[in-house]
Structure formats: C-alpha cells, structure tokens
Image (cartoon, coloured by chain):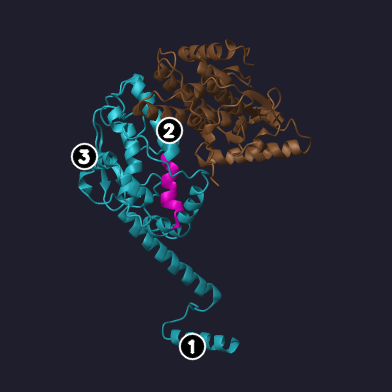
Amino acid sequence: IYLVAESKSAEPWPENATLYQQLKGEQILLSDNAASLAVQAFLQMCNLPIKVVCRANAEYMSPSGKVPFIHVGNQVVSELGPIVQFVKAKGHSLSDGLGEVQKAEMKAYMELVNNMLLTAELYLQWCDEATVGEITHARYGSPYPWPLNHILAYQKQWEVKRKMKAIGWGKKTLDQVLEDVDQCCQALSQRLGTQPYFFNKQPTELDALVFGHLYTILTTQLTNDELSEKVKNYSNLLAFCRRIEQHYFEDRGKGRLS
Amino acid sequence: MGVRVECVCGSGVWRPVRRVPDRTPSSLVKCPCSPPVSTPWIFPPQKYNADYDLSARQGADTLAFMSLLEEKLLPVLVHTFWIDTKNYVEVTRKWYAEAMPFPLNFFLPGRMQRQGLQPSRVVLARIEAKEDATLLGGPASLDAFVFSYLALLLQAKLPSGKLQAHLRGLHNLCAYCTHILSLYFPWDGAEVPPPRQTPAGPETEEEPYRRRNQILSVLAGLAAMVGYALLSGIVSIQRATPARAPGTRALGMAEEDEEE
C-alpha cells in the first residue's frame, strides 16, 4: 500500500471555473460590484477563463460572507487576496517579476484602496441616508419577500455602521469622506503617472483592484455624481480604466461591461 | 526640522517650547499627506508639515504605507496590548489605571478593551514594510507613524511577547527605532518612554490640578457627611448660651435614646 498525496496545485485550471456574485441588474451594490470586477479583471489578466454566475444568495454561499467567490474544481475561494494566493499556487502570477521593494509598494497601495475607496463606498451606500433610502435598501432586499427584505437590509446596515464606528468613520460627514476619496485618487494618480500600468509595462493585481473600484464608481448611477466627479478629476486614471476595459474586456470578445 | 516639544515629566503632556518659523507656503496649507483615519496628530497640518520636502510621489507612497500599517499592524497592536489576557492584566490595565483619576480607572480600561475587540480581524502578520525609512529620504510623517507602532511594541515589558520576540529579530527595524529614540527623545535615554504616549492616551492631569481635585473631593465628602448629620438630626445645633449647651445636648441625646 502506498499513499498518493495530491496537492491542490497539481490540477490545472479547469474550463468550468465559475465566479459567483449577486444579481447584476437589481441586487448588487457598488462595493460588491467593484470587488467582483476586480477579480474578473485579475483573472482576465492571468488569461484564465471564468464564467460569471449571478445568484441572489451569493453572499450566504461564500465561505467568508463576502463576494465574489470562485468555484474551481472542488475548491471555493472568496475575496481578491485569497484568490490571488490560490491562483499563484496553481502557477499563475502577475507579480513574480517585481522586486521586494516593489512588492511592498504594491501591497501598500492595495491596502490604500481597501482602506479608503472600499470604505468610502460602504459609507456612501449604507451610512448616507439619501442613498440608503433611495437605492440601497431597495436593491439589497429585492430578491426577498416582505418583511424579509426590510429585516435583512436593516441588519446589514447595522452591521456596516458598527464596523464604521469601530474604524473611526462613524462620525465622518459625507464631505470628509469625499475628501478622503480625492486624496486616495490623487495618490493613485501620482503613482501611476504617465505609465500604462502601475508597474510600468505589465499589469498586476493592484491594477485589477484599482480598475474594479474606479470603473464601478465611474459607471454606477447614484443619487448624485459627487463620487464619480472626484475620480474624473484625474485624466490618467480615466485613461487607465479605458485602457484595461479595451484590452481585457472588449478585445477578448466579452463585449462592453455594463 | 520643526518644533521642539518637551514632555512635562510625569504627566505625559506634550507642549511646544520653541517655535520654528513657519516654512509652509500657502499652497501647501492643504497637506496632501494628512493621515486618512484616526491617528491623533498634535499639530494641525496647516502649520507644521514634516513632509514639506517630499515630492508628490513620495507623499502618495506615504499615504499608501500608512494604510498598510493601519491595516496590518494596528490589529496586532490592539491584540498584543488589549486582548492578550496576560499582557492586558499585567501591563496595559496597570498603565491606564495609574494614569486616570478616580473613579475612571475602574471602568475605562475595561471599556477600551471591549472596544478593542470590535475590529474583527486579528492578524499576526509578518511585518513587511521593512524598507520604509530608506524609501523616503529624510525623516517624514511616515517615520513618525511607523515609529509610534514599533517603539511601543519593542519597549513595553510584555509578559507574553511573541510579536515582540519576532520584531526583535528584525535588526534593521530595531536599529531604526533606537536611532529615532536617541535623536528625538534624548532625555529618555534608554528608558522606557512614558506609557502615556500610547496613541489612544487618556487625559492626564497636571500636579496642581490633581492636588486641587483631591482637596475638593475631601471637602465635598465632609460637607455631605455634615449635611446628612444635620438633616437627620443626629447632631442638632441649638441656639442656646454656651453655659446651657452641654445640658441641651445631653437632653437631645437622651431624647434619641428614648426613641431608640
């Protein structure tokens, strides 16, 4: 008798890998859409085929409670960070060519995006009363019957508000949040400069993450345009989004991103 | 570089002792590197700017690394000082209890501990921003930020110090901290910095206020006791001549005895 140890990395990337997110048209929110788009962009950049499936209960299916998550073979992995690690274990990586210092910089900028852009998106959709009333509540509870739709929406709002308070964003005003978004975009714009991608010629997971967030902010209709205006101030960021959209989504026959 | 500050010893209160002429032109009034979230800064960014000499790109890097530190190191710090039971009981709670006036020292540290449990992730991550000081020329706000985290971790005498041991293994970071300590905190020498410099430090009172408060609280206690005694009749003040006073008092006490 001999035991055969199978490692996860031994299997190649299957053709039927799927990415799960909430319903695109009626349910998904700004922050989740950004996260999902970031993962899609990353997988496109790695040249790995993925099929996007929309499910109303995607959030509950996910092992960590966050979307998106991918189902590859018999593995289920959620969120960009773990997905990047998983893909690396399979032998595909975008950041292998970077030096130690550049890798540290990449991690730092990714944290900046998560710290500021993602938190600002969450603030806007769950703590700004106008947006909550007009958009978020209706969208979040849309797949469920009354009264479940209200209960789930309030529960989620309470959770997000608690998290905001814990990280010190509870007392912030909308203007301060928009200021932070502006600072973040300024930093990203400075770092990008005139290069095509953040680390010159080749895109990395940072490019995927930034694209996911900026593209979603630019193309999502909210109660007002203040958030997208902040991003539009930086022309190199707009060109960056356009470039990635053209190269990785349109040219590959996926059609325009809605 | 900037304004010299002096720690009024024993109380942890910092105040600038000498002003350096303000070099910040009006175009830099809006500091591009003002910290994103909740780091308490002593000086408003308009007047004193440690990042005056940094280029815009370096400013962007600063912001990014601050986010990285807040995301990775802050939960570790919170865990090390507040959630790890041994450290909390033997070090942190003692520090805060000593620094706070009565009766806050009984419940505030506990409340702060419960608040520390809220940020959901506790990550014992490897400290990856090793090259911070060398990435950006001279000392800047990022160095102050990094130093504030690392110095606390290195200097505090923690009973349960896994992270501390790990950090001590990274020699360049230790040298970095000692360098900053010797340059900007020369009066401490090699001692532990006063624990009241922790980022979420409580308000401490200066000597005269503490004395005044003690006297006031004693007086208040005395007044309360005397007032109660008078009101409930244990002690009664009779408007009588001094000769008769003992007699009436004895009478008052006899009446009380009868009632009992």
* Three-letter code for the amino acid on which mark 1 is drawn: Ala
Which of the two labelled residues, at mark 3 and mark 2, occupies the earlier sequence position?
Answer: 2
Which of the two labelled residues, at mark 1 and mark 2, occupies the earlier sequence position?
Answer: 2
A258 left or right of B189 in image: right
* Three-letter code for the amino acid on which mark 3 is drawn: Leu
Q: Colour of chain A?
A: brown
Residues marked 1 and 2, same chain: yes
Image location of residue B217, percent across then percent down: 41, 63
Nearer to us: label 3 or label 2? 2
Task: Give the residue at mark 1.
Answer: B250
Task: Give the residue at mark 3.
Answer: B183
Which of the two labelled residues, at mark 3 and mark 1, occupies the earlier sequence position?
Answer: 3
Residues marked 3 and 2, same chain: yes
Residue shown at 30% from the left, 46% from the top: B168
Q: Secondary structure at mark 2?
A: helix
User: Relative to A247, does residue A43 appear above or below in the rendering?
Assistant: below
Task: Give the residue at mark 2.
Answer: B67
Q: Secondary structure at mark 1?
A: helix
Residue shown at 58% from the left, 34% from the top: A78
* Gap between marks 1 and 2 measured at Cα: 77 Å
Pick the front one: B229 or A59: A59
Nearer to us: label 1 or label 2? 2
Q: Quadrant of residue A229?
A: top right
